[in-house]
Image (cartoon, rainbow, N blue to C red):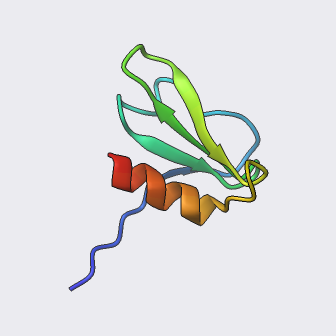
């Protein structure tokens, strides 16, 4: 049976806050079409966006999940 993975989502512009994510957790911003994560230094970092190298949010999400 397949598992569904649902990262946190934000539907308005801007990065999530550090209160929204724990270390290593990812979030997708559907308005900006970007993927963010919280790093080990308590920063929210952008790890992918649609305009970067023609990648799609789906590709970026799969990569983020694969890399852990």
Q: In screen coordinates, is 68 left or right of 57?
A: left
Q: Is residue 1 visible?
A: yes
Q: Quadrant of residue 2?
A: bottom left
> Observer-nearest residue: 8 or 2?
2
Q: Position of residue 35 (x, y in %)?
A: 59, 46
Q: Position of residue 22 (x, y in %)?
A: 36, 30
Q: Residue drawn 49% across and 23% down?
A: 18
In this view, which residue lies farthest toward the bottom? Answer: 1
Q: Residue drawn 46% across and 55% down?
A: 63
Q: Position of residue 14 (x, y in %)?
A: 72, 35
Q: Position of residue 10 (x, y in %)?
A: 62, 48
In this view, which residue lies farthest toward the top? Answer: 41
Q: How many marks?
A: 0
- Position of the N terminus by quadrant: bottom left
Q: Residue drawn 48% across and 35% down?
A: 37
Q: In screen coordinates, is 15 left or right of 40?
A: right
Q: Quadrant of residue 36?
A: top right
> Observer-nearest residue: 5 or 11?
5
In this view, which residue lies farthest toward the left? Answer: 1
> Observer-nearest residue: 18 or 49?
49
> Observer-nearest residue: 65 or 12?
65
């Amino acid at each position: 049976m397949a598992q569904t993975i649902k990262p946190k989502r934000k539907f308005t512009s801007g990065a999530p806050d550090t209160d929204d994510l724990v270390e290593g957790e990812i979030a997708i911003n559907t308005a900006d079409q970007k993927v963010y994560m919280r790093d080990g230094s308590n920063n929210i970092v952008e790890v992918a966006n649609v305009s970067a190298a023609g990648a799609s949010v789906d590709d970026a999400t799969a990569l983020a999940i694969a890399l852990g």
